[in-house]
Image (tube, grey):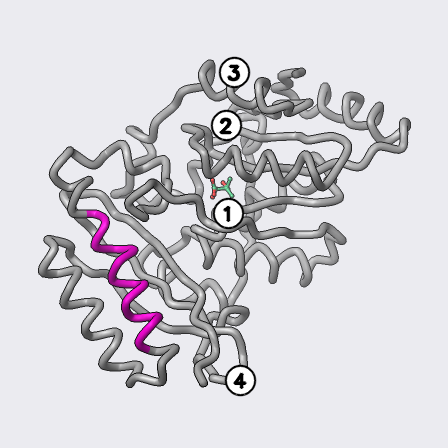
Amino acid sequence: MQTIRRVSDLRPALAAYRAAGEDIALVPTMGALHAGHMALVAEARLAAKRVVASIFVNPRQFGANEDLGRYPRREMADARMLSDAGVDLLWLPAVEEVYPEGFATNLSVSGVSDGLDGAMRPGHFDGVATVVAKLFNQVRPDIALFGEKDFQQLAVIRRMATDLDFGIDIRGVPTQRDDDGLALSSRNIYLDDEDRVRAVALPRALGVAAAAIEKGGDVADALATARDSLTAAGFEVDYVELVDAETLGEPRPDRSRRLLAAARIGGTRLIDNVAVNEHG
Ligand code: PAF
C-alpha cells in the first residue's frame, strides 16, 4: 500500500491507475477504524480494481463544543488494517493540505441537511459536504462508499454528488453491529463498561418501534415508546424520528422510510437508524 500525504503526489499515483484502465473506489474515513470501515473496504474491493482509502479528521465538521481534540487518532494501526485488507493507496493529507491558508469555500446542501443531526449540530453537514467534495475532486473515484450508520450523511452526500454532477456511484453499506446489536462507531470507545451495556437500548428501541410501525401501529405512539425506553435506560434523547429515506422529509407510506435516533449516554452521543418496511 502506498501512503501519500500531498495532492501533488496523489495526482501521478492515480494517473498511473487510470492509464492502466483501472477503475477506482474511494473509502473516505476519519480513521479510528473498526469492522464497519473494513466492510466498506471489502465492498470497495469487490466494486473496483483499485481501492483508495482516506484518513482525515476534518475539523470543519466538528462543532465548537464537540470532540475534535480528543477524537481517536491511530494512524499506524489504521494503516496496517487498510494494508492488510488490500487497500492500494492511503490518502493521508494534513489539515494544511486540505485547507490551505485562505480557504474560503463552504458547501451547503439544504433540505436533507436541515433536520435531525443537522438541526442539533449546526454546520456539521456543511463541513462534511465540503470535505467530501474536496476528496472527490482530489481522487476522482468511479465509486465511493459510505456506511449507512451515518444515514443523514449518506443522504447529504448523494444529494451533493447528484447536484454537482460528480458522476460518482455513491454506495451505502449496511451498518455493522456488535453481537448485542450496538452499531459500530469510532466513538463507542468513549463508553465505560456500564454505559456500553446500557447502550444496547438504542438499537433495541429502534427495532421495537420499526416493528410496531411495520405492523400498522400508530407512528407517534411508537416514537414515544422508543423515547421512553431510551430515557429509562439512562439516555438523554436528542431525537427519534421517522422520515422519508431519500429526502429525510415527511415520511410517506408509499415510499421508503427510515427511523433515525440520536441520544447521549454518559457524555457520549450515539446515533443509529433502521429501515421501516411497508406494512400489510
Ligand atoms: O463518516 C466519516 O468518517 C466522515 O464524516 C467523512 C465522510 C470521512 C467525512 O469527513
Mark 4 and mark 2: Cα distance apart in space: 44 Å
Quadrant in the picture for the N terminus: top right
1 or 3: tag closer to the N-terminus: 3
Find disc 2 in the rendering and name its residue: 95
Q: Picture coordinates of residue 186 (x, y %)?
A: 36, 35
Picture quarter containing residue 25?
top right
Q: Picture coordinates of residue 208 (x, y %)?
A: 28, 67
Mark 3 and mark 2: Cα distance apart in space: 22 Å
2 or 1: tag closer to the N-terminus: 2
* Mark 1 secondary-structure assignment: strand
Find disc 4 in the rendering and name its residue: 254
Circle 2 Cα neighbour tier, 10 Å, few/some/many (<14 / 14–19 / ≥20): few
Circle 4 Cα neighbour tier, 10 Å, few/some/many (<14 / 14–19 / ≥20): few
Q: Amino acid at mark 4?
A: Asp
* Mark 4 secondary-structure assignment: loop
Find disc 1 in the rendering and name its residue: 147
Mark 2 and mark 1: Cα distance apart in space: 23 Å
Find disc 3 in the rendering and name its residue: 80
Q: Which residues are magenta?
A: 199-212
Circle 1 Cα neighbour tier, 10 Å, few/some/many (<14 / 14–19 / ≥20): some
Any atom of ligand 1 within 8 Å of the CB at mark 1? yes
What secondary structure prevails in the magenta region?
Answer: helix
Quadrant in the picture for the C terminus: bottom left
Q: Picture coordinates of residue 224 (x, y %)?
A: 20, 75
| Residue at (82, 27) in percent of width and height | 17
4 or 1: tag closer to the N-terminus: 1
Picture quarter containing residue 187?
top left
4 or 3: tag closer to the N-terminus: 3
- Disc 1 + disc 3, Cβ < 8 Å: no
Mark 1 and mark 3: Cα distance apart in space: 21 Å
Q: Amino acid at mark 3?
A: Arg
